Amino acid sequence: MSVYVSTLLRWSVLQILLVICCMVSDGQAVDVSTALGPIRGFATTMDDGTVLNTFLGVPFAAPPTGNLRFRPPQPHQCWTDVYDATRFGPACLQYPRSATTSVIPYDPSLDDINVSEDCLNLNVYGPQVSGSDPLLPVMLYFHGGAHVAGANKRQDGSLLAQKGVIVVITNYRLGALGFFSTGDSSAPGNYGLLDQLEAMKWVRENIWAFGGSPDRVTIFGESSGAASTSLHLLSPLSRGYFLQAILQSGASTSPWAVLLPEYEPQKYTDELAKQMDCSTQIEHVTQ
């Protein structure tokens, strides 16, 4: 085991211990009303007496399955019953850990994750506030993982939320399901980035219900999440959905961040279709 991976494992264990020591679940239900419907989370008391509200696995887009596979995310349907947001939602489908350790250090937090194509959910952490309190700044996080691995359950937003901000940590589609492209309208690609944009739209429309200000949103991420953040700084589609950004160990100029046209994405599409024993004709690849 390399020194880097060994250090990462020790740091991950330390983080878990710190979170356990600093948090005690009260078991008190917390309900909020969003534009999509009512949501139920839970309250947590930190070691300094701060009470945080936590909402896990909140859907922000329709399941990207069937005809919505390899397509931009679509709005989620509204619901009338109270949505149970007390458990983590599934992570997006991703490569086995054994296939990614040459790209990303081994992360034990991903060993027991539940994965599904229906994975477009996010977690919200924030101080418990009253209706008369001013709205708090918001931080929306995009996880790293080389665009092939990762999940919103890897990072606990509680300690950051204790500083007086609303923290949102989102999933987005990964690997082929997130970035597969035929180079034309059949499968234009970058669905993972569009999922992130859809999460920004959800924040714009709903974060007030959690005590956050839609006009004070900071997007940030680490590694490939930072590269994604950098791309949102450049994209006109993302304009108006955030106020500022933080890049941690990545940018759109990183050599691994963007597949340039000269590398011919179609070749990757054809190779994937061949490996899956599918037709390599454009009209059949996305079926």
Image (spheres, rainbow, N blue to C red):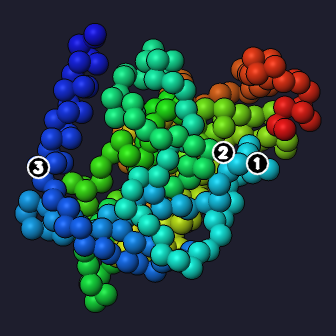
Give above or below for 120 relative to 16.
below
The amino acid type, in three-letter code, at marker 1 is Gly
Spatial CA span between label 3 and label 2: 38 Å
In this view of the protein, which residue sits in the foreground, 233 or 171?
171
- CA separation in Å, label 1 and label 3: 43 Å
Q: As shown in the figure, which amino acid type bears the numbered disc 3?
A: Cys
What residue is shown with label 1?
66
| Alpha-carbon span between mark 1 and mark 2 | 15 Å
Asked if marks 1 and 2 touch (Cβ < 8 Å), the reply is: no
Query: Which of disc 2 and disc 3 is earlier in sequence?
Result: 3
Q: Which residue is mark 2?
A: 191
Which label's residue is closer to the chain start, 1 or 2?
Answer: 1
Mark 2 residue type: Tyr
Q: Which residue is mark 3?
A: 21
**Which of the marked residues, 1 or 3, is nearer the chain's N terminus?**
3
| Mark 3, secondary structure of its residue | helix
Of all residues shown, which one is farthest toward the left? 48
Tell me: 41 left or right of 36: left
Residue at the far bottom in the pictured view:
132
Helix, strand or loop for disc 1: helix
Tell me residue 192's x, y (percent).
60, 44
